[in-house]
Amino acid sequence: MQFSAQEIAFILNGTVEGDPLVSVNQLAKIEEATNGSLSFLANPKYEPYIYTTNASIVIVNNDLVLSEAVKASLIRVENAYSAFSVLLEKYNTIKLHKTGIEQPCFIHPSAQVGENVYIGAFAYIGPGVKLGNNCKVYPNTYIADNVSIGEHTTLFAGVKVYFDCVLGNNVIVHSGAIIGSDGFGFAPNADGTYTKVSQIGNVILEDNVEVGSNTTIDRATMGSTIIRKGVKLDNLIQIAHNVEIGVNTVIAAQTGVSGSAKIGENVILGGQVGVVGHISIAKGSQVQAQSGISRSIIDEGKKWAGSPAVSYANNMRSQVVVQRLPELEKKVEELVKIIAELRKE
Amino acid sequence: MQFSAQEIAFILNGTVEGDPLVSVNQLAKIEEATNGSLSFLANPKYEPYIYTTNASIVIVNNDLVLSEAVKASLIRVENAYSAFSVLLEKYNTIKLHKTGIEQPCFIHPSAQVGENVYIGAFAYIGPGVKLGNNCKVYPNTYIADNVSIGEHTTLFAGVKVYFDCVLGNNVIVHSGAIIGSDGFGFAPNADGTYTKVSQIGNVILEDNVEVGSNTTIDRATMGSTIIRKGVKLDNLIQIAHNVEIGVNTVIAAQTGVSGSAKIGENVILGGQVGVVGHISIAKGSQVQAQSGISRSIIDEGKKWAGSPAVSYANNMRSQVVVQRLPELEKKVEELVKIIAELRKE
Amino acid sequence: MQFSAQEIAFILNGTVEGDPLVSVNQLAKIEEATNGSLSFLANPKYEPYIYTTNASIVIVNNDLVLSEAVKASLIRVENAYSAFSVLLEKYNTIKLHKTGIEQPCFIHPSAQVGENVYIGAFAYIGPGVKLGNNCKVYPNTYIADNVSIGEHTTLFAGVKVYFDCVLGNNVIVHSGAIIGSDGFGFAPNADGTYTKVSQIGNVILEDNVEVGSNTTIDRATMGSTIIRKGVKLDNLIQIAHNVEIGVNTVIAAQTGVSGSAKIGENVILGGQVGVVGHISIAKGSQVQAQSGISRSIIDEGKKWAGSPAVSYANNMRSQVVVQRLPELEKKVEELVKIIAELRKE
C-alpha cells in the first residue's frame, strides 16, 4: 500500500507543507524512520528529530514552529498524536482485513455462520456452533460443539475453544489460547490414586475481552468461569475453574489465578503473580509483578507486593532491611558481647 | 438431552417425591440452579437452599427431614453426593462421546489405528503410529512418526506429540500440550555461540496420566522423560528433559521442573513452583505455591515453602519476622545508642 | 535402522575390537543400555560400567586399558565423546529427515517456496510468504501474510507466525510457539475501559535462533521485537513487544521479559525470572532462577539473584540471615530486657 502526502492530508483533514506527491508505505517512529516512512511529532522533547529524520512524511501539530529546514514533507493537523493513531488503526484494519471461507475447512451442517465472516483453512466449526456476523476465525482454529460467538470477534490461528463456551462481541483471542479445557479437579482415593471430577461447566468471555497467546482458561466444574466485559489478559496466563474476573481488569503475562478466586473490577495484576483459590480481590487493587496473593483483599484501590503479599509500602520497607540483614545481625552480635561485658562490670 | 425425574430415579435406584414427570436438561449447584436444572443436597449446611432453589429436581439423602414445603421434585437415594457424581460422569461421557473419522484428516498408510476411535478433521497420524482402541484424537492434533498410544486415551484439539513418544491407557492430554519437544541442551563454544546437543530420547506417559492445556514435556537427551502412572499435571507446566515424576504425583499450574530432576510418588507441588535440575524430591513431599526447590529433599512426607524452600513451619516463622523487620532494625539502632550512653557512664 | 560395528567403525574412522558383525539400532547411556544399543565411554568415572553394560557396542578412547573382559564389541577412536556426538547428530538428522509436500496443505499462489522443503499436511503458507530452501514446515503450522523465512529453518508442528515477521537461516521453532502476536498495549479511558493500541510492528528472529515449545514473542507496537543471532529460548517464555535480546543469550523456561527491555549479549537468565519493562541488562550478566530484575544492570558479567534482584553474593548472605530471623528477633528482645534492667541499676 502506497499513499501520497496529499492523500493522507485529505484523510486527516490536514494541510501539506512540502512535496504533496511524496509517498510512503509504512509507519515508523520519528527516530527510526527510513525513507518511505510516515511518522509523527507530538511530544516537544522529540522536536530535534524532525531536523534529522529520514521519514518521507511527518505529521505535526498546527502550532509547531520550525527553527531549521526539514527534508520531510509535513502534514499539519490539530493533534498530531491522535491523527497518527487514526492512521495506525486504519493501517491495522487493512492488514487484518480478511473475509471469505478458505478451503479446506470443516463447518458442521448444524453450525450457524453469520455474514461477512472469515474462516481460514483447516479451521473447525463444530456441531451446533453459532458464529456471529463479521467474525474472523483464522486457520487451524477449533471451535467445539455448541460454542456461541457474538459479532466482530476474532480468533487468531490455532485458538481452541471447548464445547459449550460462550464468547461475546468484539472479543479478540490470540493464537494458541485455550478456552474451556477441564478444571484441575481430582478426588483423592485411599490407595493414593485420584479420581477425576467431571468438569461440566463452561467459560464465558464477555464483550471486548482480549486474551493473549497461549493463555489457558479452564471451564467451571459446574456453572461458569466468567471473564467480564473489557478484561484484558496478556500471554501465558492461567485462569482456573470457576474464577470470575471483574469488568476492565488487566492482567499481565504468566500470572496464575487459582480455582474459584473472584477478582474485582479495574484491578491490575502485574506479571507472574499468583492468586490462591477461593479468595477475593477488591475493586481497583493493584498488585506488583511476582507477588503472591494468599488471602482476600478487602480494601479497595490499594497497592500490594511481595509473596505473601502485604501493602506495597510495607513490602518496600521490609525489602530494604532484608538487604541490610547481614549488617543488622552483626550489630546485634556486637551488642550481645558489649552487654555481656557491661554486666560483668 | 432431557430426562424426567422418574428416569433419573431409575438410573440411581432412588424414589421420587413430587412430580415424577418434571424434566431437566442440565446440572447445577443448588444455590445457582434455574428451572430445568437438576441439583443435589448432601451437606446439611446447604439445607436452607432446598426451600428456595429454582432447580426442578434435587437429589437428596434418604434420611433428609424437611421442615418446610419444597417446589422441586426430590429423588431420595442412599448417598446424594455420590449419586450426583455418577450423573456428572454420565453427562460428561455423553458430552464427549465422539466416534468415527472426520475428513479431511491425515492417516499415514503405515499407521495402525484401533477400533471404535474418534479422529477429528485436520488430525495428523504419522508413519508407524500405533493408536489403540477407543482412543479420541480431536481436530488439529499432530502425532508424529512411531508414536505409540494405548487404549481409551484422549488427545484434545491441537495436542502435538513428537516422534517416538509412548502414551499408555486412559491418558488425557488437553489442548495445546506439547509432548516430546527437544530438551534444552546446548554446548558452549569458545566464541560465545552454542552448539545444539541432539535430543534423541523420548517421553513416556504411563496409564491414567492427565496433562493440562499448553503444558510442555521435553524429550530426554537419551533415554526417556517419564511421567508415571496416575500423575496429574495442570496447565502451562514445564517438564524438562530426563525428568522422572513418580506415581500419583500432582502438580499445579505454571510449575517448572528442570532437567533430570526426579520427583517421588504422591508428591504435591503447588502452582508456580520451580525445581532445579538433577535433584530428587522424596515421596509424599508437599511444596507450597511459588516455592523454589534448590536442593534434594530426602525426608519423606514433609511440607516445604519459600524460595529457596525450607520447612513450611520455618518459612512461616521467618516470613512473619520479615514483616516486622523495619521495627526490629529501629529497635537495634536504639539499643546501640542506649548502650553507647551506658558505656560513657 | 540397523548398523554393524564395522559399519560404524568405518564412519568414525575407528577400529573394532570384538565381533565386527554385531549390530545396533539405538543409542543409549552406558549404565542404561540394553542389548542392541550403542553406547560410549569417555569419562573414566564411568569405566566400571563397561564390564557390566548390556550395550552391544561401546565406543571407547584409543588409550583405554581394560582390566577385565568385556561382553560388548568395542570401537576404538581418538575421542569417544566427540565420536558419539557425531553419531547422535547423524541419528537425529535421519530421524528428522522429511521432504516433500503433504496434502492437504494450503499454499497461497503468491507465496514463494524454495527447493527441497518439507511442508506437512494442514500447514498454511499465506499470501506473499517467502520460504527459503531446505526449510521444514511441520503439520498444522500457520505462516501468515508476508512472513519471510530464510534457509534451513524448521518450524515444528503447530507453530503460528503472524504477518510480516522475519525469520533467518537455521532457525528452529518448537511446537506451539507463537511469533508475532499483538503486544499488550491499551490506553486507559476516563470510564475505566481501555482502548487497544494497534500493534503494527513485527518480530525478527535472526540466524541460529532456537525457540522452545509454547513460547510467545509479541510483535512490536512499531518497529521490531528482535531476537539476535544464536539466542536460545526454552519453553513457555514470554517476550513482550519491542524487546531486544542480544547475540548468544540463553533464557530458561517460563521466564518473562516485559516491554521494551533490552538484554545484552551472552546473558544467561534462569527459569521463571521476571524482567520489568524499559530496562537494560548488561552483556554477560547471569541471573538466578525465580529472580526479578527491577532496574537496569549496568556492570557487565556479574551474577544476580533475588526479587528484587541484588548481587548474587549479597542475596545469598541475606537469605541465610532470613532463615535465622526468628532467633535474631528473640535475641534483640532479650537485649532490650537486659538493658532495661541495667538502666534501672
Image (cartoon, coloured by chain):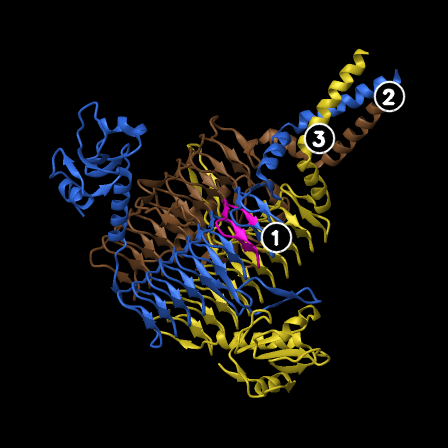
Chain colours: A blue, B yellow, C brown
**Of label 1 and label 3, which has the lower sequence position?**
1
| Residue under numbered circle 2 | C344
Dot 1 crowding, Cα within 10 Å, few <14, some 14–19, many 20+: many
- Indicate whether C290 appears above or below A180: above
Which amino acid type is marked by label 3? Leu
| Residue B328 image label | 3
| Residue C20 image label | none
Percent position (x, y) of residue C143?
A: 31, 54
Query: In the rendered structure, which segment of residues is drawn in magenta?
Result: A255-274
Which SS class for mark 3? helix
Is residue B36 located in the magenta-colored stretch of the structure? no
Q: Quadrant of the N terminus of chain C?
A: bottom left
Which amino acid type is marked by label 2? Lys
Which SS class for mark 1? loop
Q: Is residue C18 in view from this perspective?
A: no
Q: Residue at x 49, y 75 (%)?
A: B95
Which SS class for mark 2? helix
